[in-house]
């Protein structure tokens, strides 16, 4: 099958006029102009998309698909500590089946919006399987927090964590570990989870430097998170430093994926550049939860690899990665369209450790290809960033299978939405108790 458009985005966010991609099985077999591919492969089915740009499937590098059905249940109100307490009560009322239904709805929304790869936080195997069944690839981070480090092996077993090296995970999925935050996991648990991730050769992700409340806790041991840290982060003592330097002092920053990084202290951006795998920014969630804006220019100047994530639908308006990119552009106007497109594709895949198979229109890579309507333009990257949205997605192929054709899903969304709606009803009841 040849997928063609007015333009194609090739590695390095280079644009190819009249570009096209040849898909064979679940891989990209060739990339060139439409005329060249048709001439070389005369028997291939041609799907032409006039007015569209052909590009890699988007990479939402940080989200919580299992919380999709909680959208609007506990609206973000610019008070992260209070919101976490309220949303946690709701989450604890849900079970594995609820998480699966919610994750399936989130994965469906991702695919319809052009996202084919995610860095997803999960609470067990149910939501991982549900998201994977839709065709969404990525890294699924099992979240563990609030326990003594000695209990990590039994906790992972109870959560049915696969416990296998990354190479043995399904071809479109990798499993990872996340200890949530420095204020919900004590220092020994942070080190134990990083050690386990390193031994299994799997990605390690942590939310850090997200809020002023977190910084107040780390520097002074006071503030809204003090009681939470006392209850959950066993062995925690205020390190009198910022979150990034604290993680580094524990030896857990090396090759870590760090999410948010809004409240960085002096020198921490350079520390992230030297040691972390990269940073995932979620500017809309940060704004809605009252956490401020990430220091984008400081991170770029330090050489930090930046990816984009939507965070969960529970703390955002939707899972639209293009909307995230536009807000980041408002925060840092010097960002170019090329930089933003790379954050949503190549760099996102690289930060997740998937850059050898996702995020690029490149021979041998997974056949994750989308067609986005941009109209008649000589500046496809700028048009993508300025007008890209779910309703402009005309085709989505993930793993070689068509998920969206002609702007319509190829799979039934009715049962997925009905199941998610039942979870929303259950969550609403829990929220008012």
Image: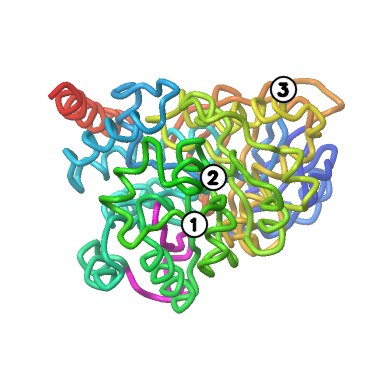
40 or 61: nearer the eye?
A: 61
Q: Secondary structure at mark 1?
A: loop
C-alpha separation, residue under disc 3 versus residue under disc 2: 29 Å
Which comes sooner in the sequence, label 1 or label 2?
2
- Residue 307 lies, in percent from the top left, at 63, 46
Q: Does 132 sit left or right of 216 as displayed?
A: left
- Residue 226 lies, in percent from the top left, at 35, 43
In this rendering, which labeled residue sits more in front, label 3 or label 1?
Answer: 1
Where 291 falls versus 169 (above or below)?
Answer: above
C-alpha separation, residue under disc 3 versus residue under disc 1: 43 Å
Where 419 falls versus 265 (above or below)?
Answer: above
C-alpha separation, residue under disc 1 versus residue under disc 2: 14 Å
- Residue drawn at x 40%, y 20% as measured from the top left: 77
Q: Does 375 sit left or right of 263 as displayed?
A: right
Q: What span is in magenta?
A: 162-180
- Residue furthest out toward the bottom: 199
Q: Does 77 sit left or right of 361 as displayed?
A: left
Labelled pair 3, 1 in contact (Cβ < 8 Å) = no
Q: Secondary structure at mark 2?
A: loop
The reply to whether residue 43 is in sight is no
- Residue 370 lies, in percent from the top left, at 61, 39
- Residue 331 lies, in percent from the top left, at 70, 27
In this rendering, which labeled residue sits more in front, label 3 or label 2?
Answer: 2
Read off the residue under disc 1. Answer: 239
Q: Secondary structure at mark 3?
A: helix
Where 144 falls versus 285 (above or below)?
Answer: below
Read off the residue under disc 2. Answer: 209
Read off the residue under disc 3. Answer: 386
Labelled pair 3, 2 in contact (Cβ < 8 Å) = no
Snapshot quadrant of residue 387: top right
Would residue 168 be counted in the magenta stretch? yes
């Amino acid at each position: 099958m040849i997928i063609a458009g007015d333009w194609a985005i090739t590695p390095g966010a280079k644009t190819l006029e009249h570009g096209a991609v040849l898909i064979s099985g679940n891989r990209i077999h060739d990339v060139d102009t439409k005329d060249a591919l048709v001439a070389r492969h005369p028997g291939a089915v041609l799907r032409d998309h006039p007015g569209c740009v052909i590009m890699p499937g988007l990479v939402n590098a940080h989200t919580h698909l299992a919380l999709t059905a909680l959208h609007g249940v506990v609206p973000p109100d610019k008070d992260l500590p209070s919101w976490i307490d309220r949303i946690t009560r709701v989450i604890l009322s849900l079970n594995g089946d609820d998480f699966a239904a919610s994750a399936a709805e989130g994965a469906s929304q991702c695919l319809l919006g052009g996202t084919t790869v995610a860095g997803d936080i999960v609470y067990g195997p149910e939501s991982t399987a549900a998201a994977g069944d839709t065709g969404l690839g990525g890294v699924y981070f099992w979240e563990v927090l609030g326990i003594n480090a000695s209990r990590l092996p039994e906790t992972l077993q109870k959560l049915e964590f696969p416990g296998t090296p990354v190479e043995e995970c399904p071809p479109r999925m990798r499993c990872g570990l996340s200890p949530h935050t420095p204020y919900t996991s004590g220092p020994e648990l942070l080190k134990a989870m990083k050690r386990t991730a390193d031994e299994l050769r799997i990605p390690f992700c942590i939310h850090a430097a997200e809020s002023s409340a977190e910084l107040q806790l780390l520097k002074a041991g006071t503030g809204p998170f003090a009681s939470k840290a006392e209850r959950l982060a066993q062995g925690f003592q205020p390190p009198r430093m910022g979150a990034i330097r604290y993680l580094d002092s524990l030896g857990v920053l090396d090759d870590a994926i760090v999410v948010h990084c809004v409240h960085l202290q002096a020198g921490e951006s350079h520390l992230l550049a030297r040691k972390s795998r990269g940073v995932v920014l979620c500017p809309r969630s940060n704004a809605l939860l009252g956490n401020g804006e990430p220091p984008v220019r400081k991170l770029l100047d330090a050489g930090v690899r930046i990816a984009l994530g939507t965070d969960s639908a529970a703390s955002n308006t939707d899972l639209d990665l293009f909307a995230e990119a536009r807000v980041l552009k408002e925060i840092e106007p010097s960002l170019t369209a090329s930089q933003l497109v790379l954050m949503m594709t190549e760099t996102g895949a690289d930060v997740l450790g998937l850059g050898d198979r996702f995020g690029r229109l490149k021979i041998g890579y997974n056949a994750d290809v989308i067609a986005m309507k941009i109209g008649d333009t000589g500046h496809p990257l700028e048009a993508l960033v300025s007008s890209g949205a779910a309703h402009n997605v005309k085709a989505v192929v993930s793993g070689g299978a068509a998920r969206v054709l002609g702007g319509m899903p190829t799979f039934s969304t009715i049962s997925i939405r009905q199941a998610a709606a039942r979870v929303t009803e259950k969550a609403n009841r829990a929220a008012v108790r």
